[in-house]
Amino acid sequence: MSGNAPDAATDDVWAEPLPTALLVLADGTVLEGFGLGATGHAVGEVCFNTAMTGYQEVLTDPSYAGQIITFTFPHIGNVGTNEEDIETVSMAGASGVRGVVLHSAITDPSNYRATRHFDQWLKARGIIAISGIDTRALTALIRDKGMPNAVIAHAPDGKFDLDALKKEAAEWPGLVGMDLVPMVTSAQRFTWDETPWQWSEGYGRQTAPAHHVVAIDYGVKRNILRLLARAGCKVTVVPATASTEDILSLKPDGVFLSNGPGDPAATGEYAVPVIRDIIERGIPTFGICLGHQMLGLAVGGRTMKMHQGHHGANHPVKDMTTGKVEITSMNHGFAVDRDSLPATAQETHVSLFDGSNAGIQLTDKPVFSVQYHPEASPGPQDSHYLFDRFVEMIANTKKAA
């Protein structure tokens, strides 16, 4: 045999593994990797999340509807999944997230709370994932060029219609002007009494509420409702399309404006008039995330699309009313333009990463909101005081009535 003849055994050993997943960006860039989770393809906006923990909560946060999440932390899935850390109100409801981009392959779970392997959980929830991606390089691209539209695709046989995927990514209109709340809001009204998880006890129940809060569901997270219940509130959740009359008929002591996905200006076309009515009636109101953005719109401000957004569990925010700094969890691609706010809207919180607005309160009404997620507890409980502040506002308003 000639010394130049191929060695079949060596060829087998060094054969390149077949890519079974692709991330196709709108500019035509194609990233190859290995598929996990559900098969098929989905289109969305690619963002990066810097959280090192909480991937299950992130992937069930309705605020991520329409997005493909790139985790910057390389090892995702190593503690498995369970049934207690899901954030969608409907345990069986579909996750809004379109896909997941990972650096490393998923390992077997190594946590006593785990009930299912992460890959199996992704399959069950219909979430497409790709591993083997240089997530640091992708994050750098997002920082330089902004959040790109893309298609994530998983085919176990490695066969893709690349031209069709590129066309779909290029033609997707993006999140600006897109109202995604209808796909994540509750279809009907319901009550909530579950309180936060306690070590060795699990979740509790609110049995003696002092106040009645109506929560408008734009994509609300379960732990927000739990913290409202723990703060002493009977919580009634209503759909995003609830009218002023629907809400007033419940005789609320306070109104909560929830988090949610998409462009606040688009959702605000039907939500802002209701919020404005609630504010004008002097009902104590508290907003988080999308609720904060639409509150800003309701008082006459504007919202704007961010270059790379804020997604992570390590964002420092300064409370301008106390001078304290909180470590917060954030998830938003739009922000309130502080320069557009009226004099009656006082800025209360500021991001220490980029100086963007992170909270407001009205000087003439019992109303306030924050851009971040105080229920997510990365601090771990730096921001839980906001729920107490809301309840105190309700109590003071009732006393003055």
Image (spheres, rainbow, N blue to C red):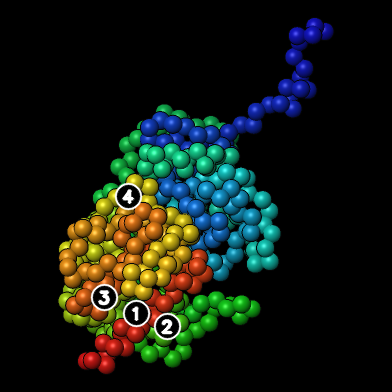
User: Which residue is tagged 3?
Assistant: 367
Instruction: Look at the image and tell me whether residue 197 can be seen.
Output: yes
- Quadrant into which the C terminus falls: bottom left
Q: Amino acid at mark 3?
A: Val
Assess whether mark 2 and mark 3 are in contact (beta carbons under 8 angstroms). no
Q: For the residue carrying disc 2, how many other residues have a C-alpha within 10 Å: few (<14), some (14-19), or many (20+)?
A: many
Q: Amino acid at mark 1?
A: Phe
Q: For the residue carrying disc 3, how many other residues have a C-alpha within 10 Å: few (<14), some (14-19), or many (20+)?
A: many
Assess whether mark 4 and mark 2 are in contact (beta carbons under 8 angstroms). no
Mark 4 to mark 3 CA distance (whole Å): 25 Å
Q: Earlier in the sequence, mark 2 or mark 4?
A: 2
User: Which residue is tagged 2?
Assistant: 231
Mark 2 to mark 4 CA distance (whole Å): 33 Å
User: Which residue is tagged 4?
Assistant: 306
- Give the camera-side residue of 273 and 356: 356
Assess whether mark 1 and mark 3 are in contact (beta carbons under 8 angstroms). no
Quarter location, residue 293: bottom left
Assess whether mark 2 and mark 1 are in contact (beta carbons under 8 angstroms). yes
Assess whether mark 3 and mark 4 are in contact (beta carbons under 8 angstroms). no
SS for dot 4: strand
Q: For the residue carrying disc 1, how many other residues have a C-alpha within 10 Å: few (<14), some (14-19), or many (20+)?
A: many
User: Which residue is tagged 1?
Assistant: 390
Mark 3 to mark 2 CA distance (whole Å): 17 Å
SS for dot 2: loop
